[in-house]
Image: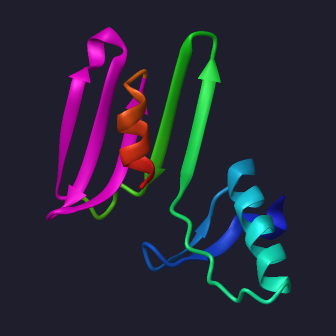
Amino acid sequence: MGDVACYVDLVFETRRRFEHWGNAVAQGRLAARNMLGERQPFVHPPYFFSDVFDLSYEYWGETNPADHYVVRGNPLSGSFSVWWLNGDRLVAAFVMDRPDEECQAAEQ
């Protein structure tokens, strides 16, 4: 997977190495569409997830440019989300055992 792990991240304007199979799948799908004539850039913020027993979480973005964050839910309960912002721009989100609407908002 090394050949698709390194890419130019157009969202955060940096070269990024991101070794997650979801990144490889997204690049492969875009490559196929581009070979068919679409000619679109790869715009894909970092994303990963994990499911371990009853623990499930998802993460999008990059926390480095954030100047503040917001926590929803209670981290001690295991059901919470953290939203990192730079000004009014969302730059990263971590969601664990929260309503689907929060995951959908983070992904967008």
Q: Residue at x 23, y 22 (%)?
A: 73
Q: Is residue 75 magenta?
A: yes
Q: Quadrant of the C terminus?
A: bottom left
Q: Position of residue 40 (x, y in %)?
A: 64, 84
Examine the rendered structure and indicate whether residue 59 appears above or below residue 66. above
Query: Which is more toward the observer, 107 or 68?
Result: 107
When asked about the image quadrant of residue 6, the answer is bottom right
When asked about the image quadrant of residue 4, the answer is bottom right
Q: Residue at x 76, y 59 (%)?
A: 24
Query: Which is more toward the observer, 6 or 22?
Result: 22
What's the magenta region?
A: 67-96
Instruction: Tell whether 82 sits left or right of 67.
Output: right
Using the rendered image of the protein, determine whether residue 20 is visible from the camera's viewpoint.
Answer: no
Using the rendered image of the protein, determine whether residue 30 is visible from the camera's viewpoint.
Answer: yes
Q: Residue at x 26, y 50 (%)?
A: 84
Q: Position of residue 33 (x, y in %)?
A: 78, 77
Query: Which is more toward the observer, 65 or 29?
Result: 29
Q: Residue at x 50, y 37 (%)?
A: 58
Instruction: Tell whether 91 sits left or right of 52.
Output: left
- Secondary structure that dominates the magenta span: strand
When asked about the image quadrant of residue 102, the answer is top left
Q: Quadrant of the N terminus?
A: bottom right
